[in-house]
Image (spheres, rainbow, N blue to C red):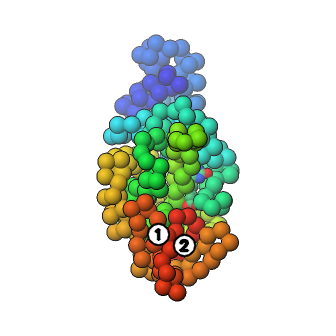
């Protein structure tokens, strides 16, 4: 791995470079250089080779490889440790299994998930081209404030999409929407002892370079659909990690300001909604979001209700 990354570094700063020069400069055998080049190609780097001249990097990989995501990343602790897999059942499972011993800010990324999970036991379609990752956080805060944390993550996604030119909004609690269609979602899970939380695993899924048909979901959109071309996923991933860190620090220091910012982006408020929770389903008017992130609604019999979980659709 180390010599592969050194080969990549040299190729990034040169036009053509010969295998012999690479091997001399890096102090490794020609066979090892050849192995590094073929591994890089397998990771999706396009490297041309010309007899008697050498190798040239034509195109970087578009996978979310840790060294690509970390390069130029301006965070203090989010994404300092990145675990990357081409395919996982769910990044949540791997992140949950290491959460207790992992450093805060560790990120688990998969190019594809075969059993991606959504909120309320739903399936989350996760083909290649999307951005699917789980983030391990260990905030030392009162338990009741935990519910504000996912709202801050929703804001970080909205911030990142705004940076690339999209006006995204939030549907309570955490659906990231563009013109009424869902583009990203957030799932929060915990590992806990009896009376305290060890770690929180935040799962984030963004429908990035995916064609709508591939997703197979009504009422959803993708970045390809919005832009009509592919986006630079590595760039977006860096923006996400950076905005996540900013919003997380804001949450730790001044969580009431997260609620204020959240409300300004929430499209559920002042709307007529249908609330589905467990076996119940009812119509109501969405009034406000309280200090713990719960949705306050007014029922048709003029009583108010505090919704902490479930599905709320806008009529
Ligand atoms: C939702 O229902 O809106 C939440 C979707 C969360 C999906 C992400 S993708 C990465 C992580 N791994 C999973 O299995 N789910 C989350």
Cα gap from disc 1 to disc 2, whole angstroms: 9 Å
The quadrant in which residue 122 appears is bottom right
Closer to the eye: label 1 or 2: 1
Residue in front for this viewpoint, 13 or 6 = 6
Q: Is residue 29 left or right of residue 21?
A: right
The quadrant in which residue 78 appears is top left
Residue in front for this viewpoint, 212 or 256 = 256
**On screen, 267 above or below 291?**
below
At horizontal 48% and vertical 77% (from top left) the residue drawn is 304
Q: Residues within 10 Å of mark 2 (few under 14, many from 20)?
A: many
User: How many badges with numbers are in the image?
Assistant: 2
Q: Which residue is mark 2?
A: 312
- Of all residues shown, which one is farthest toward the bottom? 301
Location of residue 194 in the rendering, given as x and y in whole percent from the top left corner: 59, 41
| Ligand 1 neighbours mark 1 (CB distance < 8 Å) | no
The reply to whether residue 143 is visible in this rendering is yes
**On screen, 19 above or below 265?**
above
Quarter of the render that holds ligand 1? bottom right
Location of residue 231 in the rendering, given as x and y in whole percent from the top left corner: 45, 56
Q: Which residue is mark 1?
A: 295
At horizontal 57% and vertical 49% (from top left) the residue drawn is 189
Q: Secondary structure at mark 2?
A: strand
Q: Which mark is residue 221?
A: none
Q: Are marks 1 and 2 in contact (CB under 8 Å)?
A: yes
Location of residue 207 in the rendering, given as x and y in whole percent from the top left corner: 53, 59
At horizontal 56% and vertical 82% (from top left) the residue drawn is 283
Location of residue 58 in the rendering, given as x and y in whole percent from the top left corner: 46, 40
Q: Residues within 10 Å of mark 1 (few under 14, many from 20)?
A: many
The reply to whether residue 68 is visible in this rendering is no
């Amino acid at each position: 791995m180390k010599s592969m990354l050194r080969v990549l570094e040299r190729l990034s700063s040169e036009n053509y470079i010969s295998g012999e020069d690479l091997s001399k400069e890096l102090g490794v055998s020609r066979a090892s250089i050849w192995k590094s080049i073929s591994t890089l190609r397998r990771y999706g780097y396009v490297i041309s080779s010309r007899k008697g001249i050498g190798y040239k990097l034509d195109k970087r990989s578009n996978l979310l490889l840790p060294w690509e995501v970390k390069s130029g990343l301006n965070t203090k602790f989010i994404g300092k440790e990145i675990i990357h897999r081409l395919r996982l059942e769910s990044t949540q499972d791997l992140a949950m299994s290491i959460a207790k011993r992992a450093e805060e800010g560790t990120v688990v990324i998969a190019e594809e998930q075969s059993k991606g999970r959504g909120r309320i036991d739903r399936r989350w379609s996760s083909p290649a081209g999307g951005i699917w990752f789980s983030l391990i956080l260990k905030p030392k805060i009162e338990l009741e404030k935990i519910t504000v944390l996912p709202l801050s993550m929703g804001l970080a996604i909205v911030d990142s999409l705004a940076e690339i030119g999209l006006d995204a909004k939030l549907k309570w609690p955490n659906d990231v929407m563009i013109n009424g269609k869902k583009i990203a979602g957030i799932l929060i899970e915990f590992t806990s002892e009896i009376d305290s939380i060890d770690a929180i695993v935040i799962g984030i899924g963004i429908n990035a370079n995916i064609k709508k048909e591939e997703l197979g979901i009504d009422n959803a959109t993708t970045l390809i659909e919005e832009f009509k071309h592919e986006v630079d996923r590595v760039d977006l991933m860096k923006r996400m990690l950076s905005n996540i860190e900013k919003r997380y620090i804001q949450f730790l220091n001044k969580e009431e300001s997260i609620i204020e910012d959240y409300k300004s982006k929430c499209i559920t408020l002042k709307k007529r909604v249908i609330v589905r929770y467990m076996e119940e389903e009812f119509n109501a008017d969405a009034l406000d979001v309280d200090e713990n992130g719960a949705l306050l609604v007014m029922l048709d019999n003029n009583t108010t209700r505090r919704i902490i979980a479930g599905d709320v659709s806008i009529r």
